[in-house]
């Protein structure tokens, strides 16, 4: 049986009529950039995330970039983040001219280890940027406590964590600013690129609204040096339709994770951990295995697609060698990068497909022992 890694086509077919009607309305209105669909989506997504304001932009990377700029991060500053993430987290810090400073991740959740933060703070530190990796919330209470005590801002990279919760609070609503991506493969995906910043601050909201649109308060009155980071009207319309399904899709992912845990409990793989009281949204169903290549080859030969998120921690990427970290700097992040395999995970998966993945894993184990 073939099990794809994800199936955006199937999801589209299920909502096709609503999507085509919504997109057609945008074309009729000719509000191709920003416009009322985007404004309505901003309000709806902010409410979904438990934040007061939402500012829609053209990617998750842009959301991070503008959140950092609004926080006042710039040349000469340092931002504490993790190397166990998608490269965009780190790239966005560098766009501002600031320096990313890494701390390692926790060996259970693979998110920022709060015990490592204090030692990384210097007089130049301006903000802490935790990542809710794979849809699993970072341990926010100690991060927020350190930030408050040391006068730092907290920006959440929630690009993989739409609807995830930490002790009942939604990701993106706990720090000073939250950043989301709507890249098509994310839990809430546009039909193109998209992103959004959440915040409770009217000042940050005003600044980011200007920055995304050439720094203008109103047309041709440029108060700030800005960017063309506006969300397209079509993406706002598509995202509004899809947002109505997101809770059901998230619950489906969570049910698949329960099924995986049951089927894989004897597999010898390190399975994802949901901390009690939190809500993991399983953007990625990440398992660890010391025999990654053989494991993946075996699953692929049995028709099961897999991925790696991510094979190289950011501090060991040639592009970021200038940060001066070497191999061994962040052992947990390096361990995750060496052993991680992402199993198929998408809301439309069937019980039969999950069992097929379980069987493929069992077949691999039986030839190994
Ligand atoms: C996807 C992602 C981003 C970047 O979002 P884009 O919309 O692709 O620009 C940033 N951080 C993390 C953790 C991501 O997964």
Image (cartoon, rainbow, N blue to C red):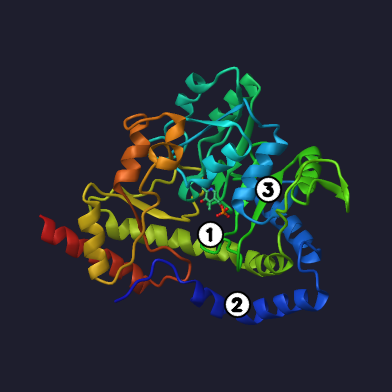
Identify whether 17 is placed above or below 152. Answer: below
From the top left corner, tell me how far across and down residue 158 is, in percent: 57, 47
Residue at the far bottom in the pictured view: 17
* Residue at 77% in and 42% down: 225
Quadrant of the drawing holding the C terminus: bottom left
Q: Which mark is residue 15?
A: 2
Please report whichever mark, 2 or 1, sits nearer to the chain's N-terminal start: 2
Quadrant of the drawing holding the N terminus: bottom left
Q: Which mark is residue 355?
A: none
- Which residue corresponds to mark 1? 186
Query: Quick check: is the Cβ at mark 1 less than 8 Å away from ligand 1?
Result: yes
* Residue at 42% in and 32% down: 104
> Separation of disc 3 and disc 1 at Cα?
16 Å
> Separation of disc 2 and disc 3 at Cα?
26 Å
From the top left corner, tell me how far across and down residue 359 is, in percent: 24, 67
- Which residue corresponds to mark 3? 197
Query: Could you say which is closer to the camera, residue 98 or residue 10?
Result: 98
């Amino acid at each position: 049986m073939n099990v794809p890694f994800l199936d955006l086509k199937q999801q589209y077919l299920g909502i096709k009529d609503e999507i085509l009607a919504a997109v057609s309305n945008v074309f009729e209105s000719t509000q191709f950039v920003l416009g009322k669909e985007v404004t309505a989506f901003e309000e709806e997504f902010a409410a979904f995330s438990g934040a007061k304001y939402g500012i829609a932009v053209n990617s998750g990377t842009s959301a991070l970039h503008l959140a950092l700029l609004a926080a006042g991060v710039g040349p000469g500053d340092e931002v504490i983040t993790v190397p166990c993430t998608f490269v965009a987290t780190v790239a966005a810090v560098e766009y501002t001219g600031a320096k990313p400073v890494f701390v390692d991740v926790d060996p259970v959740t693979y998110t920022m280890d709060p015990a490592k933060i204090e030692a990384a703070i210097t007089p130049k530190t301006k903000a802490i940027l935790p990542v809710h990796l794979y849809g699993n919330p970072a341990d926010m209470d100690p991060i927020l406590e350190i930030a408050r005590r040391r006068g730092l801002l907290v920006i959440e990279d929630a690009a993989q964590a739409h609807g995830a919760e930490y002790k009942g609070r939604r990701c993106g609503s706990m720090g000073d600013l939250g950043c989301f991506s709507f890249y098509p493969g994310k839990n809430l995906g546009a039909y193109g690129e998209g992103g959004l910043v959440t915040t409770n601050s009217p000042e940050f909201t005003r600044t980011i609204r200007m920055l995304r649109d050439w720094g203008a308060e109103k047309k041709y009155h440029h108060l700030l040096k800005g960017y063309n980071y506006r969300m397209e009207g079509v993406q706002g319309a598509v995202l509004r339709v899809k947002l109505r399904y997101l809770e059901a899709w998230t619950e489906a992912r969570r049910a698949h994770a329960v099924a995986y845990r049951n089927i894989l409990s004897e597999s010898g793989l390190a399975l994802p951990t949901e901390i009690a009281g939190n809500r993991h949204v399983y953007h990625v169903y990440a398992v660890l295995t010391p025999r990654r290549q053989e494991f993946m080859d075996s699953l692929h030969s049995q028709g099961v697609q897999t991925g790696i998120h991510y094979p190289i921690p950011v501090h060991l990427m040639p592009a970021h060698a200038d940060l001066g970290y070497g191999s061994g700097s962040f052992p947990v992040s390096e361990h995750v990068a060496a052993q991680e395999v992402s199993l198929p995970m998408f809301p439309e998966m069937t019980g039969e497909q999950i069992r097929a993945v379980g069987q493929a894993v069992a077949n691999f184990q039986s030839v190994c022992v």
